[in-house]
Image: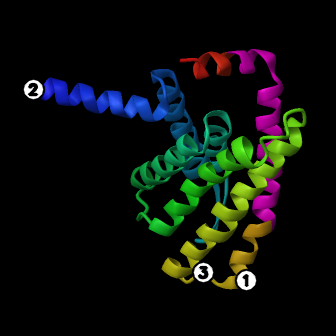
Amino acid sequence: MAVNNKSAAIKSDIRLFGSTRILIVAALLVAMSIVLGKFGAINIGNSIRIGFGGMPIQMAGIFFGPVIGAVVGLVADVAGCILKGYSINPIITLGSTCIGLVSGLMFHYALKQMKKVLLPKIAISTVAAHAVGSMLITSIGLYAYYHTPFETLILRVPIYLITAAVETAVIYLMLKNKAFSSELDKVRRK
């Protein structure tokens, strides 16, 4: 009986992602986000961290949709905090979740009509994701939990605009690469 319950749980997890392939790629994107955002970031004081942990989260949203992007953002933040020894701030976790959600919503729904112009579509998706997730929600979390001064929080705006530009270029180059796009299409196929 326990085997059937475990099997049903695994099937429901895969159903959320659509396929085992997407589940595996999402797990890899979580790992990339943790490495780039928690271990590979440059910390400036206690409130400013320059890193690219949001890029794999946005990739999940852009490649697979807003739900998978949100799940990747949530898991990456919680697992990264546990691995790094940080306390979990639910507002910052919400910000990370929104990065994946907003990038997926923008790319797949709000900008759906922009089929021929990939670069602006990615740029708008990444800037919107960082505006909501990083600049707004995460800044609120930093202020609410750690009383980070407004003068420090305002520095997050130019940092995340530059970060969004770099992430846009990387995601665009990946999607324009025929070999990468071909492999991504294989992952998406059920």
Residue at x-position 35% and y-position 33%: 12
- Asked if the residue under mark 1 is in contact with the one under mark 3, i.e. CB atoms within 8 Å, the reply is no
- Circle 2 Cα neighbour tier, 10 Å, few/some/many (<14 / 14–19 / ≥20): few
Residue at x-position 47% and y-position 23%: 19
Residue at x-position 66% and y-position 70%: 136
Who is closer to the viewer here, 42 or 104? 104
Q: Position of residue 172 (x, y in %)?
A: 81, 35
- Label 2 – label 1 distance at C-alpha: 58 Å
Residue at x-position 64% and y-position 49%: 54
- Circle 1 Cα neighbour tier, 10 Å, few/some/many (<14 / 14–19 / ≥20): few
The segment highlighted magenta reads 158-182
- Label 2 – label 3 distance at C-alpha: 52 Å
The residue identified by callout 3 is: 148
Q: Which mark is residue 151?
A: 1
Q: Position of residue 70 (x, y in %)?
A: 54, 49
The residue identified by callout 2 is: 1
Q: Position of residue 132 (x, y in %)?
A: 67, 64
82 versus 32 height, above or below = below
In terms of secondary structure, where does tag 1 sit? helix
- Asked if the residue under mark 1 is in contact with the one under mark 2, i.e. CB atoms within 8 Å, the reply is no
Look at label 3 and name its amino acid: Thr
91 versus 103 height, above or below = below
Look at label 2 and name its amino acid: Met
Locate residue 162 relative to residue 66 in the image: left or right.
right
Look at label 1 and name its amino acid: Glu
